[in-house]
Amino acid sequence: MLTPVVVALNAVANALGRWLLAPVAALPGWLSATIVGAVTGVLLLLMFKYTSRQKSIKKVRDDIKANLLALKLFKESAVVALKAQGGILIGAFWLFVFALVPMIVMMVPVLLFLGQLALWYQKQPLHVGEEAVVTLKINGDKDAAWPKIALEPTNALDVDIGPVKVVSEREVCWNIKAKEKGLHHLVFQVGDEKVDKELAVGDGFMRVSEQRPGWAWFDVLTNPWEKPFSSDSQIESIKIVYPERSSWVDGTDTWVIYWFIVSFVAAILFRKVFNVNV
């Protein structure tokens, strides 16, 4: 039941991401990753401001400061110290409670946005002459009949090996070599059905969709660009193994850490500018 919702949200995120993240292709990786992190940090800060109880948060923070001051001034009084410590713990609890609603509100757009960023930073496109493995996975039990499967010829690539069946996994694999730069579409004939999968070939930064997913909400969320296969399709997924990026700033997996750090720092720096209590 959740998958159609994710598909609909991805459609909106893809439309916005196509336009908003287009400059990533023209900028150095470190610069685009830094700009994206800083801008999203400020936007999340503003979202927190307008979805949280700012007056209540300010009051709790003032109480915590007062208790910290009491600890410093009356550190020789055990009673005062215990009361102040208790007040600090209670204040921390209420800060957590007041942050729950904004965090829940921000969760959906953040997850969708990370899915869009992953298209640019998680993998790099194939270079001309570079090889990759393409895997088409079929639905059904291990003993179920196999449909006829073929990868249609295209000028964008050469097929060096394949199709190779992995019967135990219900997979068909091809080893391909890229020939032309650009965003291409691989066309597969699966029984009476024709399906396609995007292939990215080029230098620098391109939108790279590693997998066309099946009808499972998590797979759809983490692979947002291409239309998922329906629940009654005989195809479960099509995946291309792209090369990993080696940079810590905009490389495979580590780009998420860098994005979080830059977003957090930007939010802290602009907190007083936008008068946000957190």
Image: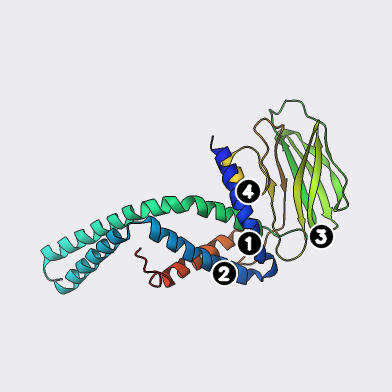
Mark nearest the camera among 4 and 1 is: 1
Pinpoint residue 242: horizontal percent, then vertical percent. 72, 55
4 and 1 marks in contact (CB < 8 Å): no
Of callouts 4 and 1, which one flags the residue occurring earlier in the amino acid sequence?
Answer: 1
In this picture, is 229 found above or below 106?
A: above
Residue to which mark 3 is pinned? 181
Q: Which mark is residue 35?
A: 2
Q: Residue furthest top?
A: 144
Q: Secondary structure at mark 4?
A: loop
Q: Residue 186 vs residue 210: left or right? A: right
Residue 96, quarter of the rendered image: bottom left
Q: CA distance from mark 3 to mark 4?
A: 23 Å
Report the mark closest to the observer, 1 or 3: 1
User: Which one is earlier in the sequence, the residue at label 1 or at label 3?
Assistant: 1
Q: Provide the residue designation for mark 1.
A: 21
Q: Residue 83's x, y, as percent?
A: 15, 61
Q: Label 1 to label 3, Cα distance in Å?
A: 20 Å
User: CA gap, disc 2 to disc 4?
Assistant: 22 Å
Name the element at disc 2: helix
Disc 3 or 2, which lies upstream in sequence? Answer: 2
Left/right of residue 121 with respect to residue 191 in the rendered view: left
Residue at image position (76%, 52%) is: 199
Horizontal and vertical percent position of residue 244: 68, 59
- Real-space Cα distance between discs 4 and 1? 14 Å
